[in-house]
Image (cartoon, rainbow, N blue to C red):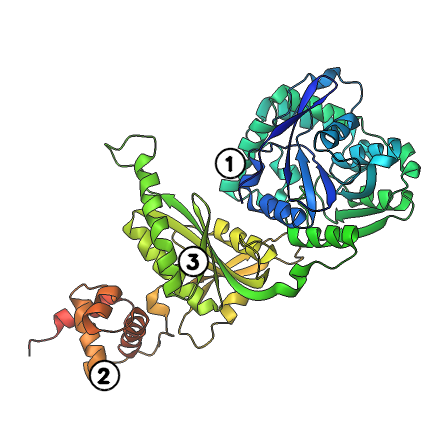
Amino acid sequence: MRPAEIRYARSDGARIAYRVAGQGSLDLVLVPGLPSNLDILPEEPGYGRLVKRLSAFARLILFDRRGMGLSDRVDAIAQAEPLATNDIAAVMDAVGSSRAALIGASEGAAMAIQLAADKPERVRALVLFDGYAHFHGAVMDARKLRALIDSIETSWGRGVTLAALAPSRTEDRRFADWWGRLERLAASPTAAAALMRLNAMIDVRDRLADVRVPTLVIHRTEDAHASVQGGRQLAHAIAGARLAELPGADHPIWMGDVDRVADLIEEFLTGARPVSDRNRVLAVLLVALLGGESVRPGFGADGRLLNEQIERFQEAVPKVTERHGGQAERSGPNRIVARFDSPARAAACAVALREAAASHRLSIAQGIHVGEIDGSASPLSGRALDVAAGIAASARPPDILLSRLASELVSGSGLQFVERGALAVEGIRDPLPLVALASERHLEPIQRRARAVDLALLSTREREVLGLVADGLSNTHIAVQLGLSEHTVKRHVANILLKLDLPSRAAAAALVARQPAQ
């Protein structure tokens, strides 16, 4: 979905960037925390999913806080008031909204609280996500603040805040690179440090009793930035407030299980359970992450060749996926997401994608997981997809990693797996066990008992296949020559290796070469 046009509202001499999504009768303003940039955030699937869900039932108004993102880079240090609530009102005026519900995320919660207390006629309801009333009580003390500001001033733009705000993604190199870019486009190092100093001034504890609008407090229990105690204090001090605690450690509202967050917000503001609840289905999800070999001499250092290789490969992906009963979508220049109804089909497709990537001189790492998704959603999103993406990010090319749950559903398929440790997943107490799809020689259990090699053990068809293997033909070429499916050929090869107790195709070819001529 293409983001709406960026516009600007005037507020006390500054221009505040905003955009509007959706056309619902309910106006809903998302008051963001740091970092934010309306241009780059839509690149992250979780953010896009949250915007799509919220704009489905409301007119969603998004903006960048002054001094941040696309809004004017004013001298934040000169602002005596850390909560520029006039900016929210100015954006509402610019879009013709006299009264709106506010979602205050992180420090945006305090801004939303202050506006509700100062101008209750402008606020119909509050949703406070991972928010707090007192910075030093819920986020960090003065010593930790000084250390954070020092690191911002020396390392801003290199993902300095990633571990504090999104700890579940620190091992995802691609996301870490993107996060560093988000920091750079959100603010300069000086502005970021100044905004953090302003956040440290937040203390709206004396205004909580003045809030008289319906309020929902949502907080992740293991939030790495703002303690859940901050959310509990908000819910206790605001009259009639409801508290919903969710699992997870990541701080941004658009990370983690955004569908669950959107469900809570929609039900709270509309009084009706989201329609998407009735569309949840069990699916097998595959995420593939692409890379390339070193650019060869003569093609320049700008990666032009690599980009062309990736583009050609991406064009072939839909046909490969459909051949294995899946539906693929491109969710980024180097990422593929596909949905299947069977883990065996997903695994077979992963093998085919790996072979196709190799033919394009690309590296590929893949992750497979099974879980519930919203079957009507496009693009694909949800917790199960986040887990599959995490599995792919932890794989080393050309590995195909699966959650043990997914691997246990392919019993009888002939696939075999080797243990690959476990993955820590946000919101899950115990690490998720992982397995890797073994190479072809393990498609059937290898018999350990030594026995003489006897080609008479093979069927006529298997001997045909063995001869073509010895000629150096791939499964695909063997399938074409014999008029079989590639899957059938793969099964024949597995049976040949099993019956002859051989470790690999190369060993089978060598065996044929050693046989006396007939």
Position of the N terminus by quadrant: top right
Q: Is residue 313 left or right of residue 90?
A: left
Q: Secondary structure at mark 3?
A: strand
Q: What amino acid type should be assigned to the residue bearing mark 1? A: Asp
- Residue 354 in percent (x, y) is at 35, 56
Q: Which residue is mark 1?
A: 177
- Residue 333 in percent (x, y) is at 43, 43
Q: Is 221 in front, or is 111? A: 111
Mark positioned earlier in the residue sequence (2 or 1): 1
Residue at 63% across, 45% down: 51
Position of the C terminus by quadrant: bottom left
Q: CA distance from mark 1 to mark 3?
A: 23 Å
Q: Secondary structure at mark 1?
A: helix
The label shown at residue 405 is none
Give the residue at the far left of this rendering. Answer: 518
Q: Which residue is mark 2?
A: 459
Q: Which residue is mark 3?
A: 400
* In contact (CB < 8 Å): disc 1 and disc 3: no
Q: Is 489 in front, or is 268? A: 268
